Amino acid sequence: MSSDSEQRLSALEDQLRELESRQTVMQQKTIAACYESVDNIRKQFKTKVDLLDQHMRLMTEKCIKFEETISMQDARMKQLQSELSQCRLNDRVLASHDMKLAEHDLRLDMIDCKNTNGVLLWKITDMRRRRRDAVSGKTPSIYTQPFYTSPNGYKMCARLYLNGDGMGRGTRLSLFFVIMRGEYDSLLPWPFRQKVTLILIDQQGGSHVSDTFRPDPTSLSFQRPRNEMNVASGCPLFVHLAILDSNGYAREDTLFTKIAIDITNIIRPDAS
C-alpha cells in the first residue's frame, strides 16, 4: 500500500472516531434533556394533583357544611309545620268558638216576642263589634226576632247586612224582608202581597231613611215557604255606610230600624 493511501485511511479513521465521539455526546445530551423534560412534567403533574386535591378538600368541606345546613333547614321546616298545624288547630278552635258566639247572637236576635201588629222596632246594640264581625265575614248578617201581621197571621223577620250585600257590599247597609214558615200558613192567602216599609231611624229626630216596596207575586220570596225561611228581598243599597258615622243614626253604639207591614185588607184566619 502506498503512503498516500495509508494517510487517507488514517484520516478517515480519525473522522470516524470524531463522529462517534460527537454521537456519544449528542446521545448523552439527548438523554439528559429527556430526563429533565420528564422531571419537569412530573413536577407540573404533581402541582396539578396537589391543586386538585386541595380543591377536593374544599369541595368536601362545602358539601359537609351544605349537608349540615340542609339538616338544620329540614329540622326548622318540621318545626314550622308543627307550629302551622298547631295554628290551624287553634284557628279551628277559635272558629268553632266564633261560630258558637254567632249562633248565640242569632238565637238572641231570633227570640219570638210575638209582635202581632205587623210592625217591628228593632234595636241593634254593639254596633262596632257587629260591624267588625260583618267585615271579617264571621257574621255577615243578623236577623230580627220573628213578628206577625196578626196573632194567626204571616210570620216574618228582617235581615241586616252591616257591611252590605251584593251590589252594596263594602259600601252600603243592606236591609231585607223575609217571609218565614208559620203555623197558620195553610189558612193564609198566597203569594204574600202586603206593602213593606223599611226604615232607618234618625235618633236625633231628623230625617229617617225609608224605602217602601210591594212584593212581586211571581217571586219565590213571597210564595208560601217550603223551608224555614224564604229568600230575603229588599234593599241591598239601603243606606251608605258613611252616613251611619256622620249622622245621628248610630248613637251610643246602637242602631234602630223599623219594619212596617201594611196589614189592611188581609184576610185573617181568626176573623168571623
Image (cartoon, helix red, strand yellow):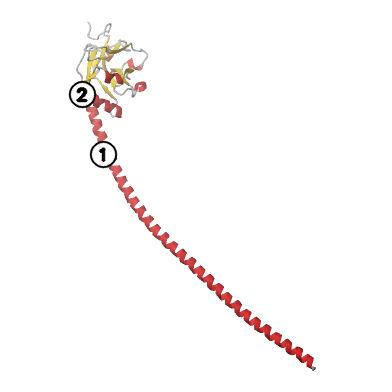
State the image coordinates of residue 93 (x, y, percent, origin top left): 25, 37
Task: Kindly identify which residue carries mark 1.
Answer: 90
Residue 228, visible in the rendered structure? no
Residue 9, visible in the rendered structure? yes
Closest to the observer, 128 or 225: 128
Q: Is residue 207 above or below residue 41?
A: above
Q: Is residue 252 above or below residue 34?
A: above
Closest to the observer, 120 or 134: 134
State the image coordinates of residue 40 (x, y, percent, origin top left): 53, 71
Closest to the observer, 252 or 113: 252
Closest to the observer, 114 or 14: 14
Quadrant of residue 13 within the rendered picture: bottom right
Residue at far left of view: 113
Mark 2 element type: helix
- Spatial separation of the CA atoms under disc 1 and disc 2: 27 Å
Quadrant of residue 96 within the rendered picture: top left
Residue at the location (29% across, 44% down)? 83
Residue at far right of view: 2
**Label at residue 108:** 2
Q: Is residue 66 left or right of residue 244?
A: right
Residue type at mark 1: give it.
Asn
**Label at residue 110:** none
Residue type at mark 2: give it.
Leu
Q: Which of the two discs, 1 and 2, labels the residue nearer the N terminus?
A: 1
Residue at the location (70% across, 85% down)? 16
